[in-house]
Amino acid sequence: MPMIEPKDAIAQILANTTVLETELRSLEETAGSVLAEDIVSRHPMPPFDNSAMDGYAVRAADIADATEATPVSLKLIDEQPAGRATDVAVGPGTAIKIMTGAPVPAGADTVVQVELTTEQDGTVDIQAAKKAGRNIRLAGEEMAAGTTAVPTGTTIDHVVIGVLASLGYAQVSVYRRPRIAVIGTGSELVPVEAELSPGKIRDSNSYALTAQAKAIGAEAVRMGVAVDTREETTKMVRAALQQADIVVTSGGVSVGEYDFVKDVIEELGGKLHFWGVRQKPGKPLAFWTIGDKLVFGLPGNPVASLLCFEEYVRPAALSMMGREKLFRPKVAAALTHDFKKKAGRHHFVGALVERTETGYKWTANGRQGSAMLRSITGVDGVAVIPTDVTEMKAGERTVVQLVTLPEDH
Amino acid sequence: MPMIEPKDAIAQILANTTVLETELRSLEETAGSVLAEDIVSRHPMPPFDNSAMDGYAVRAADIADATEATPVSLKLIDEQPAGRATDVAVGPGTAIKIMTGAPVPAGADTVVQVELTTEQDGTVDIQAAKKAGRNIRLAGEEMAAGTTAVPTGTTIDHVVIGVLASLGYAQVSVYRRPRIAVIGTGSELVPVEAELSPGKIRDSNSYALTAQAKAIGAEAVRMGVAVDTREETTKMVRAALQQADIVVTSGGVSVGEYDFVKDVIEELGGKLHFWGVRQKPGKPLAFWTIGDKLVFGLPGNPVASLLCFEEYVRPAALSMMGREKLFRPKVAAALTHDFKKKAGRHHFVGALVERTETGYKWTANGRQGSAMLRSITGVDGVAVIPTDVTEMKAGERTVVQLVTLPEDH
């Protein structure tokens, strides 16, 4: 099977990805999910005329001549706290004491804030004129009943949760988030808590990939490590397919004789879409579908494995959960040093990015080509160097996919 | 108590904030936490010399003259899969078949990748010379034993989790994350699932603030709404103080007679540091400490409430969990329209931000001055307009605190 271009790989993946079904979720469990319904205001917002101030509800006509020197005295006939509605109406020469957010009593058409008043012995002296409507928030002035407050397709954050709460949406229809099952493969791998014995290293990919899946809001299940026997691998992949929308394996997709993953997935019905992408790291990436489920065969090299998740699994998972924005923001950034590579593959390079007066700069992080995750800790983004480029000079620009907000320097 | 400047408010808050104690956490529960110990490699990484390729472990001297036209035949004496260590040694004229990641057998000093070989009947023909050391990853080449792989103070992400797993850290010491208890106040508030009755609106702040606390990685507890009686408020604040490091109330801190929150917190031992910040929205913000605990009295206005969490509670909570970076990245961005305000307060304005060839641009989102959360859905950042500015023209620049990575336009 010939190697394909990264852009063709992501296109094939997304062509085989569909948005998951909707589900009702309790409001408090929706952060990060995508709305699958228009959120419509069932009543005007605010629901009733209410006071924007602590003060006195009065008739504007009564206080038209009030000044600090010549205040107007009004008789206090009731008190209107927030949370209930008085049935006393304000008539000529009278006032009702009112709290912020409380309904404006019948008859009143303006509110004078407490700072412009003096209250004594059942009367209040008003020290300034106010036009009708001042300090009153009118029913429906923010939204009429029936207004779409938040449209379907919106990603829910704390602000949207507040809007939904204010409109009485205790449950809300959202797109289900994918469940991602992560399988490590390799007879050399032992669990994190095990002592090393000769020839063994610790499994790190299944932990890192599971955390990567959780970080994008997916449900993630770390299945563990399938040792390099066909039976073991079959059993674990089958269990993963039973519970997950996306199965991610790491290792087992190169050409070694102990790499069973491809055979196992195809025996289980996997339709191979591609195997081999013109990129470094991550060349042996493979992608299958089994019905609606996606299966990614990531390389065992830890850096390659996480890079392939970032570039290919992440957009697919976001698409499944209904997100519109699937990719990181891209900037053109100037290299701070010379860079050489061989032709024939696109290189993805962990980049430390700075923002300067004249734009973005990037520096390759740590030792390039290392398979060690430590070489990509703390990167701000991924620089993409096209396949046919072999040499770049300091100052030349490349595309960088940003994963953090770079700081000024 | 006089109003203070926003910068003095945050300074007073941080002066009263201390990093929480450390705790051991299972590796899989550490994403977002800050390391409280140096992660030291307990052994060399890689732990043993291993093959970077699938191929044949040989002696470089034996194949010095090998070419495609004149291959060198070696006798195959064993097979070395990953995960165990053969005790057969490679001697003159022999080779051991080896998989990627497998230990390099004694006697061999180079590995020839499978693509440059032909195997038949117990011998392998090597078609190219390789210098000693090729395709071998040496023990310790990434890290010697005792190397600090990840320093204390690092925020843990999926990459760091992978590093910790590879080094055998099944548990790790991190700073505890703060527990934030959120209390809504106001007799006008009913729960999200309730029908509205006259004078009532739905509680939205307790839901939104709880989601905001979770979004920064804090533990969050939504206590609910304390109706406007002193007893009810005292009971709920006391319960919140018993379980939380930070108590956040919303509402109840203006000058209305039904606003008990200040009195209640001070009766419970709260030491008031400030009440009133020269800002809009959010002027009535109050801040107390009770021992090591922080108490924030946020305004009831929903937009003001969330803004004050963003500007003041968030940095305090991040500081408690050991983060170094407490504030959002700031950019200078050009207004896309004219802007007027009164002097006397700093204005925080929800901003839609775009990145252009010449820098950042921002546009005020929706209706400024609205208390409705809907007016701040989807903002990219918070623009800060200083107290003495009263008018800005399109094209003038202000500071914008970015909360998202703005897209190119």
Image (tube, coloured by chain):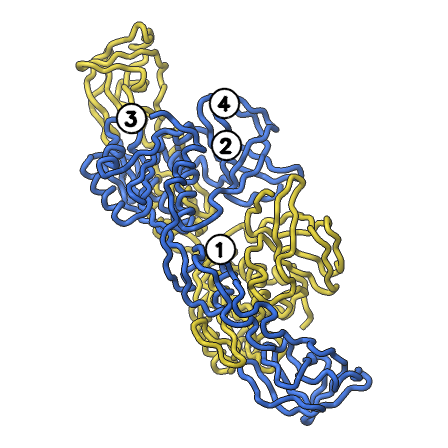
Chain colours: A blue, B yellow
Amino acid type, mark 2: Val
Nearest-to-viewer mark from 4 and 3:
4
Judging from the image, mark 4 belongs to the subunit labelled A
Provide residue B81's location: percent of width, then percent of height: 24, 27
Judging from the image, mark 1 belongs to the subunit labelled A
Residue drawn at x 48%, y 32% as measured from the top left: A349
Residue picked out by circle 2: A384
Residue drawn at x 42%, y 63% as measured from the top left: A172
- As rendered, which of B91 and B218 lies closer to the eye? B218
The answer to whether residue A164 is above or below residue A334 is below
State the SS at label 1: loop
Same subunit, tags 2 and 4: yes
Provide residue A21's location: percent of width, then percent of height: 36, 54
Provide residue B175's location: percent of width, then percent of height: 44, 54
Provide residue A101's location: percent of width, then percent of height: 59, 77
Image quadrant holding the C terminus of chain B, namely top right
Q: Residue furthest front?
A: A146
N-term-proximal mark, 4 vs 3: 3
Residue picked out by circle 4: A388
State the SS at label 3: loop
